[in-house]
Image (cartoon, rainbow, N blue to C red):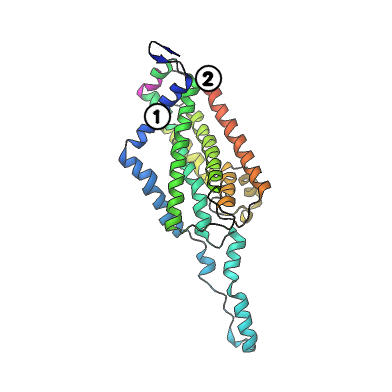
Amino acid sequence: MTQNGNSKNPVHGLWALTNRELKKWYKNPILLLMTTIVQPIIWLGLFGHAMNLGNLFTSNTITIPTNLGIPPQALAQLQEYFAGAPTQLLKQAFGTDSYISYLSVGMLSFIVLFTCMFSGMSIVWDRRLGFLNKVLSTPVARSSIILSKILNTVIRALIQAGVVLIIAYFIGPLVFGAAFTPINLLGVFAALFLLSTGLSSIFIFIAIRSTRMETQMAVMNLLNLPLLFTSNAMFPLKFMPDWLQDIAQYNPISWATDASRQLIINSSIDMTKLIQDFTYLGVFAIVFAGMGIVLSWRYLSK
């Protein structure tokens, strides 16, 4: 139905606002190149290889001294027995014999977090530039304003995660597990979709009442590193202190990363744990997206 040439369908308003947000991204060649190509290459090529903990295991073989009086035959057997020890230690620690693969999958959640961080900034800019006042004067629902910001962030985050996955495969190299099939990628992107929905909602509803860019930047800096380092994106939870494990197991980044690792690099899939991860992520996304919509009805004003 249309009136005076304008559609009353709420989806049209939602898509119009979402497309406006996306245009600011894909119509800026430098921003598009930096966020989708250069940034993933820097993170994986520099940070990933500089932090390659796998070299601690695979670059050092266990050598048994020959002056211990051990018969040559027994010494040869011992050397053969310990030859695969570094790789086994790596597998026990990270679930794979390639730490780059372990880190590459963690980078998917990592890039989603850093994309979602800036989702609230557009609310602040729209308020300061007067665009928010104009939108609030139209029949578009306030919930559509929030959902458009969330949808824009989710689309950008998933595209960048896909680029990270491709780059990781070629320059990592990313080693797929025995349980991997191409269909598993749908599960990976489903987990990242739920994660980015929840995270972007958090940063957006924090920015709803903010009028200063400095305030939002302070909030971003306060939340991003604790969320990253209290997760299993770069290091297994089992090696963290007990008090940190208690925090990390409730971190949504840990759930998304665990689900992605099971589907991409693990040799087998624990369906019970996988269903748990998706349940937690689903609740996380629904609760915080709902909070963002409710807060928009109450506090989003001119």
Above or below, 25 relative to 164:
above
Question: Looking at this rendering, what residue extends furthest in the top direction?
Answer: 4
Residue at the image point whose x is 39% and y is 25% from the top = 126
Measure the alpha-carbon separation of dots 2 and 1: 22 Å
Measured as percent of width and height from the top left, residue 285 is found at: 57, 34
Q: Is residue 122 above or below residue 81?
A: above
Q: Amino acid at mark 2?
A: Trp
Q: The C terminus is located in which quarter? A: top left
Give whichever of discs 2 and 1 has the lower sequence position.
1
Nearer to us in this view, 35 or 229: 35
- Asked if residue 132 lies in the magenta stretch, the reply is yes
Region rendered in magenta: 129-133
Which residue corresponds to the image point at 61% horizontal and 84% vertical from the top-left?
A: 76
- The amino acid type of the residue labelled 1 equals Asn
- Residue 173 placement (x, y as % from top left): 46, 59
Magenta region, mostly helix, strand or loop?
helix
Quickly name the residue at label 1: 19
Label 1 environment density (alpha carbons within 10 Å; few <14, some 14–19, many ≥20): some
User: Which residue is label 2 attached to?
Assistant: 297
Q: Nearer the viewer, residue 78 or 246?
A: 78
* Horizontal arrangement in the rendering, residue 292 relative to residue 172 (left or right): right
Q: Residue at x 53, y 27 (%)?
A: 292
* Any part of residue 56 in sight: yes
Left or right of 179 on screen, residue 164: left
Please give left or right for residue 192 compared with residue 130 in the image.
right
Comparing marks 2 and 1, which lies closer to the viewer?
A: 1
Task: Indicate the quadrant containing the N terminus: top left, top right, bottom left or bottom right.
Answer: top left
